[in-house]
Amino acid sequence: MQIIEQHEGVEQVWLSLVYPIINENETEALLVLDLSESFGEHLNDFNSPLMTVVWMMQIFLLLSMFLLVFLAYRYYKIRKELIIDDLTSVYKKKYLEEFFDKNRLEDYDVMLLDIDEFKEVNQKFGYEFGDMILKEFTQTLLSALSPDAIVVRTVGAEFLVVSPKSESTVEVQAQKIFDRLKEKKYLIGNEIQYLTVSMSAMSIPENSTSFQNIERLLDEKLLEVKSKGKNALAILSEEELSGVNYNNIDYIKEALEEERLICLYQPIYETETKKIMKYEALVRLIDKEDPEKLIMPFHFMKLIKGTSQYIKMSKLVLQEVFNTLKRYEDLEISVNVDLDDLDNADMMKLITHNLYENRMIANRLTFEILEDHEVKDHEKVMFYLQQLKAFGSKIALDDFGSGYASYSYLIKLNIDILKIDGSIIKELKYSPDHAKTVIRSIRELAESFQYDLVAEFVSDEEIYNIIKDLGIQYVQGYYLGEPKPIEWYVDKKY
């Protein structure tokens, strides 16, 4: 069958449809259908709008294709801006969220690095040279890592490294990187410069669920390194990692709402007689999955400090302590209070309310004052302490001899008890002569001011005997008594 277009020879015929009729391989006839030119014109008129639609669809598809290509390009550019650092070409923090949505935390080691005093480099040499150093630093860091490691620039001169766990421990890997970065020389103009780096590192524990908790632990450890002089590497210990999943505000909030809180009590002994004189209340949270497991404060205290959850915890602790004082009429108990707590209106209201409601037994309560920053307004602090002492409670100054606790406290604050910082007591093992001299001077001061004196962290018999020979009135530590439920000591006593 054929379609023949008639151009000439047959007037007014547009197309002919020729269909052969074949019998035994021979054409015996032709069936011909002629279509007139007028019919062709009719079909053209009919098809013209359809052809227009077809052409418009083709144009639309072509434009759509260009639009899709443009959107894909824009997505690529925007995604690159979101996850790739323009200066160093390593990843931004956003990338890690996507990465750990697809990969298990426990399969990786993590390191946090910060170039020490990099602001001074920018100020001394200018931001242009500072940027050049950052680029070179990044390349040096990448060269010290395995190809499958991920480098993230978090902010400024701080970098986060995520690498798969291998046969090599995180300590070995981190030390290798630290040494490489420490040896690196930088040429700026005609000057050779070295950079020092502060680092923290950890192997992510099994069953970890939140990378934010991991970052928090690394940040805290890095801050500790910097506070001790920088230019050092610190590896998080097993104890620090044991509660990584507890560093979650929702977990802590749930525990406090369910009142999964307990106070353990560590006895304070008279040194000569080894008789228990009072107890220090130490807060613990109870693990949700394993009620026998107690969560130490360093896992959650910084997380809730200054929040309503901290007020909730303090309320539960005070209730527990006063209930214990009511239950055992001859007990004395001390509780820890931060200086910031005294400067918090809600906390002071909570404390003074509890003292007023329990004013008949408040004289058996001691507040151990903790401080992690220098006191600048001693008069204000003295006013707060007087409010506590007005109910008959005593004031103890904790961790005396180190940190911010200075001798000016003895002059300006009306306290009753000094507790020698545990780091000084520990030095009796390593630098006994110097430690003894310091402890004697603290004892003489305490005697002059008529303060009771307590030595903390007495961990073995050797230290106990030294403390006894030095004439320290009271001792506290694991050698004599560990933190236990109060019933454990009271039942034992009677």
Image: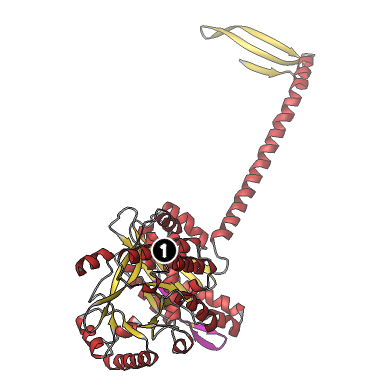
Front in this rendered view, residue 392 or 444: 392
Could you tell me residue 482's position as x and y percent? 26, 71
Circle 1 sits in a helix, a strand or a loop, which is it?
Answer: helix
Could you tell me residue 253's position as x and y percent? 44, 57
Residue 176, picture quadrant = bottom left
Residue placed under numbered mark 1 in the picture: 214
Front in this rendered view, residue 360 or 231: 360
Q: Quadrant of the N terminus?
A: top right
Relative horizontal placement of residue 232, taking residue 155 as reference (left or right): left
Please count the marks in the image: 1
Q: Which residues, given as a range, are shown in magenta?
A: 186-200
| 243 lies above or below 396 | above
Residue 217 visible in this rendered orientation of the protein:
yes
Residue 39, picture quadrant = top right
| 223 lies above or below 41 | below
Residue for point 72% across, 28% down: 51
Residue for point 48% across, 82% down: 195
- Prevalent SS, magenta region: strand
Residue for point 31% across, 80% down: 456
Residue 126, picture quadrant = bottom right
Could you tell me residue 377's position as x and y percent? 54, 82
Q: What colour scheme does the image use?
A: secondary structure
Front in this rendered view, residue 212 or 443: 443
| 110 lies above or below 431 | above
- Magenta stretch: includes residue 138: no
Amino acid type, residue under disc 1 in the picture: Ile
- Magenta stretch: includes residue 196: yes
Residue 169 visible in this rendered orientation of the protein:
no
Residue for point 39% across, 58% down: 105
| 48 lies above or below 252 | above
Q: Quadrant of the C terminus?
A: bottom left
